[in-house]
Image (tube, coloured by chain):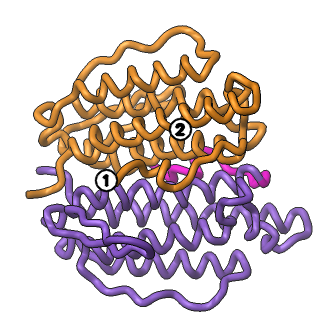
Chain colours: A orange, B purple
Amino acid sequence: MSLTEHAMSATLHRRMLGNLLAWLDKAEDHARDKGQDGAELLALRLAPDMLPFSQQVLIACEMARITLARLGDAEIAAFSGAVDSLAGLRSRVRAAIDMVDGIGPERLAGRSAAAVVLPQRQGEPLHFSGEGFLQQWALPNFFFHVTTAYALLRHAGVPLGKADYLGAI
Amino acid sequence: MSLTEHAMSATLHRRMLGNLLAWLDKAEDHARDKGQDGAELLALRLAPDMLPFSQQVLIACEMARITLARLGDAEIAAFSGAVDSLAGLRSRVRAAIDMVDGIGPERLAGRSAAAVVLPQRQGEPLHFSGEGFLQQWALPNFFFHVTTAYALLRHAGVPLGKADYLGAI
């Protein structure tokens, strides 16, 4: 038996999004201990020209949805509305989890050989095989935003550790 | 054709380690512009209880080597000796690339179904299938250290952007 598209996309994304939900819970607990509501975390950045925490979380959700939509040949509706609280971020993560959970193994089987075309805001679309898309674009981008969100919470003093990052194994 | 173990391990690790080499070059250029040699970057941390930049890079290299060794059923020798410069980090990254390049597709084919046992410093070893090992442990850990290294350089003002993170696509 070889590697399945489902394990390397849906299962992986589902796992890390679940971990991200738990980090948001811990961030809220940490804020509450300091008499805050956590909304002050949303604007944190690691560098002035990097996106803030709220965007790192929202883009991680979008990366998961886009990846499963492209690989699963599904349509996704854009999210709308601003998010200005940890509770708001949590509901976006939950929505991304629901979307990922809706793409079963049968939708993904064999899709590593399919052509994936990714429109770009500027310039020509990117062309991949499903495999190249996962390996060169989807997984690096998803982990970039998830890990940067984690790094920002650690930098802000939220008590998280490697076991929170990886989740239960 | 389904997803291959080689693409999702060796090719992916090789690509991100090559990107990491380029970040180290830019970090050295940035330090030189400020009249420094870059060694001051090695001790940077995002939180007091997180590992410094040098360790993030070294562990990213180890994660790549361990992953390919476990999946490719190969032995690896431990690295020895301290690393106290960007040049030293670069040679460890190059050594990791050489190791990854030495594990061809034929060594990895079908290994997603193999049993992977991962000894732990404390407690019982972790037991995975090759697929579970990649999805739950190897890729999250590798991206954790690579992305944290990138985040530290961005936090230190090294001029990097998403195209540096992803590499040429």
**A144 or B166, which is in the foreground?**
A144
Vertical position of residue A111 compared to residue A57: above or below = below
Provide the residue designation for mark 1.
B135
Q: Horizontal and vertical percent for residue B4?
A: 20, 58
* The residue positioned farthest toward the top in the image shown: A81
Side (left or right) of A28 relative to B128? right
Provide the residue designation for mark 2.
A23
Vertical position of residue A55 compared to residue B21: above or below = above
Residue B2: in magenta span: no
Which three-letter amino acid code belongs to the residue tagged 2? Trp
Q: Horizontal and vertical percent for residue B5?
A: 23, 61
Q: Secondary structure at mark 1?
A: helix
Can you tell which quarter of the image residue A149 is in? top right
- Report the residue at 61% width, 34% height from top: A27
Protein chain holding label 2: A
- Report the residue at 82% width, 65% height from top: B31
* Residue A73 shows up from this direction: no
Q: Are marks 1 and 2 on the same chain?
A: no
Callout 1 crowding tier (Cα within 10 Å): few <14, some 14–19, many ≥20: many
Vertical position of residue A112 compared to residue B142: above or below = above
Q: Horizontal and vertical percent for residue B163?
A: 57, 46
- Report the residue at 37% width, 13% height from top: A77
Q: Horizontal and vertical percent for residue B160?
A: 68, 50
Q: Name the front one of labels 1 and 2.
A: 2
Span of residues in magenta: B156-169
Can you tell which quarter of the image residue A69 is in? top left
- Report the residue at 72% width, 42% height from top: A156
Protein chain holding label 1: B
